[in-house]
Image: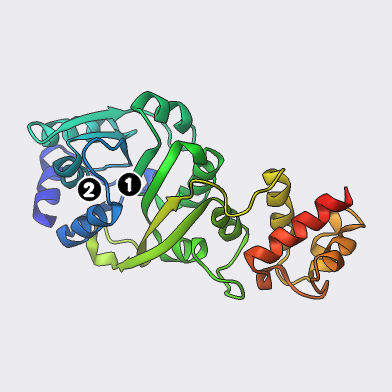
Amino acid sequence: MRERILRQLKIHGLAPRKGLGQNFLIDPEITRRIVASAGVNPGDPVLEIGPGLGSLTIPLLEKVKTLWALERDEKLAELLRVEAHGVGDLTILDGDALQVDYAELAQQLGGPLHLVANLPYNISTPLVGRFLDQRHAFASMTLMFQREVALRLAAAPGNKDYGALTVWLRLWADAHVLFDVPPSAFHPPPKVVSSVIHIRMRPAPRAELADPERFHRIVKAAFAQRRKTLRNTLKPLGAESVNWLEAAGIDPGRRGETLSFDEFVALYRAAEAAA
């Protein structure tokens, strides 16, 4: 695969664009594992973001036969159309992944999307935030990130990777880090180890909350200054926040990173009861 990709780049006069975070996957075993991990079937509405030279695109097409791909680089889009000819039905969409209305796209494609992507590392965290903002547009996500980001999404309480994004994701989905990918699997090789994570959206949130956005604000405040105790980090939400902690049975001297998901829910419910 490496030789094929290098040949493609040379023939078409292309080079990886750093500004778009392009690191092309060149290991066929890794692509096989990602496609298998996605668990998609013919008929599923499958979306790929940043298909690049088609390392994942072609194996996905061979499995699902119909695929939508979001690619901003027109030269790469032209190449993909050639590579996909005779393999399956590939529709290439032009757009910024941070601006796409995924809910509208899911409606157009006939149901919640199965997202498969090797995401640009420079925008991976805001992209996950975007996906969660439009969470009802997705059935599952099989994503490759910088390892630190993947660990953050699936971290346990008390771990340095555990944060507001972890808790927010846990409300809506189940996330599992599947395997690591070395720099040698890419061209050009990044300076970091990557990881593949599978996220399956839950049919209902893990906890029924009347105001999920308020829950999110409380969680974000708890992690805003990680070295400070909850007594101090929650102060911007109101002086009564210390009463919420006591009502939830949480020591105000603890830090946000020590709270379990259920404790965050208890804290939110105490805040709601006090309103």
- Residue 116, disc: 1
Query: Helix or strand or loop: what does disc 2 sit on?
Result: loop
Residue 235 sits in quarter? bottom right
Residue placed most toward the observer, 111 or 100: 111
**Residue 33 lies in quadrant:** bottom left
State the residue lying farthest toward the right.
Answer: 239
Q: In this view, does 22 lie to the left or right of 173?
A: left
For label 1, the SS is strand
From the top left corner, tell me how far across and down residue 161 is, in percent: 55, 69
The amino acid beneath tag 2 is: Leu
Measure the alpha-carbon separation of dots 2 and 1: 8 Å
- Residue highlighted by disc 2: 56
Q: Which residue is drawn at 77% across and 70% down?
A: 228
Disc 1 crowd rating (10 Å Cα; few below 14, some 14-19, many 20+) is many
The residue sitting at 12% across, 37% down in the picture is 83
Q: Which residue is drawn at 56% across and 60% down?
A: 166
Please state, as top left, top right, bottom left or bottom right, where the N terminus lies in the image.
Answer: bottom left
| Left or right, residue 263 beside residue 5 | right
The residue nearer to you, when weighing 13 against 26, is: 26
Q: Which residue lies furthest to the top in this view?
A: 108
Q: In this view, does 111 lie to the left or right of 44?
A: right
Density class for disc 2 (Cα within 10 Å; few <14, some 14-19, many ≥20) is many
Q: In this view, does 253 lie above or below 54?
A: below
Across and down, in percent, residue 117 comes to: 33, 47
Residue 46 image offset from top left, x and y in percent: 30, 38
Q: Which mark is residue 133?
A: none
Residue 203 vs 269, above or below: the answer is above
Residue 21: x and y in percent read 37, 48
Q: Are marks 2 and 1 in contact (CB under 8 Å)?
A: yes
Which of 187/219 is in front?
219
Question: Which comes sooner in the sequence, label 2 or label 1?
Answer: 2
Residue type indicated by callout 1: Val
